[in-house]
Image (spheres, helix red, strand yellow):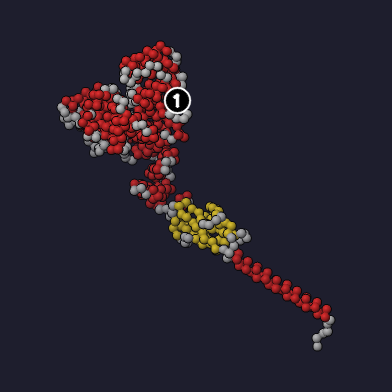
Amino acid sequence: MLPYCTKTDCAKAYGKARLMAGIHALMLTLLFVAIADAGARASIQVTFDLHNQDKVADVVRIEAHVKSAVQIDQVQFYVDDQLQKTVTGIPYQFSWDTIHTTEGPHTIKAVATDDNGDVGTGVLQLTVDNQLSLGAAALADKAQKALSTDDMDGAKRWARRAEKAEKDFLPAEKVLAALDAANLHFHAAAARLQKAKDLAQSITAQQMLATYQMHMALIANYQAEFVSLAQSALKLNTRAADLKIARINADSQISSTQKSIQTGDLYLKTDRPQQASTAYLPATTGANASHSAVVRLALAYVANRQFSDAQHMLDIYRIKKQDDAAMRAVYALALVMQHKTAEAETLLHNDLKNNIPASQVVGSYIALQQGRKGEAARLAQTALTALPLAPDASFALTMATADQLTARKTLRTALLLAPQQPGPYLIYAAQIALLNKVHNYVLGEKIAAFASTLLPSAISPRILNALMLTVVHNFDGAKPILNGLYLRFPTYPDLAVAMSAYANDINLGGPASRYLTAAHHLDPALYSIQIPPSASQTILTLYLQMHYRPCFFLTLSTLFPHTVQAAGGN
């Protein structure tokens, strides 16, 4: 029999039983949630695209895939327990540059952490194999071959491996420097070569470094260093040429005539016309005299301002009607530089009809001197179209074109490809001084002075140097330059105008007028102005408008476009 209870007691007992049941159910629910939560935390899984024991090289992408029921907060990547990168969003990856680590096995670990602070870890065993066992030379050779086929990625990969195999290995640094230069990082390219081993023994590396330094000189950020960079570039080119000359002279397989021509070419390309003349001379004498050597010797004479020597030698061939287009171009250049433009134009008449590039360059100089800028530009452009890397054609177009963008581009080409020629420096100095938003006569004067050292016998660089000094009121520096020139060349009208400008700037009205009158008598067609100009006006007129007596030049590659090769070698 059940115990008796009142209605109230029964209700209380029933309520208590229901409360206990609810508590029990809640505990079970909390238990299930805890179990489910624990299951979720335990389910963080980390896997990789790569597999254990895979071989990797160069820069490899390590990507982790994370599975989790809870939001992932971050994934940390370790290489041999050293933290490399923390990633907070998909994709979970980092780039591992294996060049900066040792060859052989390495442990990769990815640690994923979720929003609850729980972690999951994936571990991967990889082997770094950059084929360093091939050796630096073989790796660099692969890099150079890739570069020659425009495979830039391959060139970079192999060159970095070669650099890892042997620190500062020159063949590898040359490839990496070329890649830097291709991306216009000339400072980085130059720095690579400067630190490389055996730079002094490599012809091509020194030439490359010289080119990069000239590129740097033409960048605005390095403008203040223009002269020092140009001087360094010329020294590098000279050392490379001397190294090549020594190897040529030591090579018993090269004939004496070819040695004469090749060494003369190298001297001429590096601003040493007197030494070039000496080198060429043996190949121009005797029954087997080389026709091309005669042209080269004449060009060396012209470059050294020995105009009569060049003409007398070429006259022998002209009288015998054995001259050719190259000879006539050099002869005409000598005439133009003596301001005998009409005679030069007659000489080149037929060659211009035949579209000979060297004749077109000189023809452009002639037209420029006669005030026919449109024709001068046309001839220079035609020559440049035929020979896109001709610095003399670029120089001619710089002076003749009315398009300032073209003028700046072609001047840059002339400076880069013929850094030994003073003419382009004169225009660049005048542009620096007159055409920039901030005039820089001090730098212009330094560039003009540098151009004067390239060819001591030339007049134009010294006139510009003196005018620049006058503008900055360095009258004591300008006066001896102008007086010395005027004593030697009293019949040069451009010099008389410069003397007038100097006198005008120091407030000597009488001498200023007298010198201007003298210039008018010497060349009434060009100098008909009545009021003495200032030094800055004279710079503008002589060097950026009239180009009355600039340092014209021809290069061997324009005279002999199918035969002349640049100095090469290792």
Q: List the single residue furthest toward the top.
A: 510
Position of 218 relative to 507 (above/below): below
Position of 532 relative to 3 (above/below): above
Instruction: Tell me the SS state at disc 1.
Output: helix
Residue drawn at 49 percent across, 56 percent down? 62
Residue 526 appears in the picture as rendered: yes
Q: Position of residue 221 (x, y in %)?
A: 46, 35
Relative side of 289 to 485, left or right = left
Residue drawn at 34 percent across, 48 percent down? 149
Residue drawn at 31 percent across, 25 percent down? 371
Q: For the C terminus, give its image quadrant.
A: top left
Q: Position of residue 270 (x, y in %)?
A: 33, 31
Residue 529 vs residue 61, the one in the foreground: 529
The residue under label 1 is 441
Q: Position of residue 485 (x, y in %)?
A: 35, 17
Q: Amino acid at mark 1?
A: Tyr
Instruction: Decide: few, some or many residues near mark 1? Use Cα within 10 Å; few <14, some 14-19, many ≥20.
Output: many
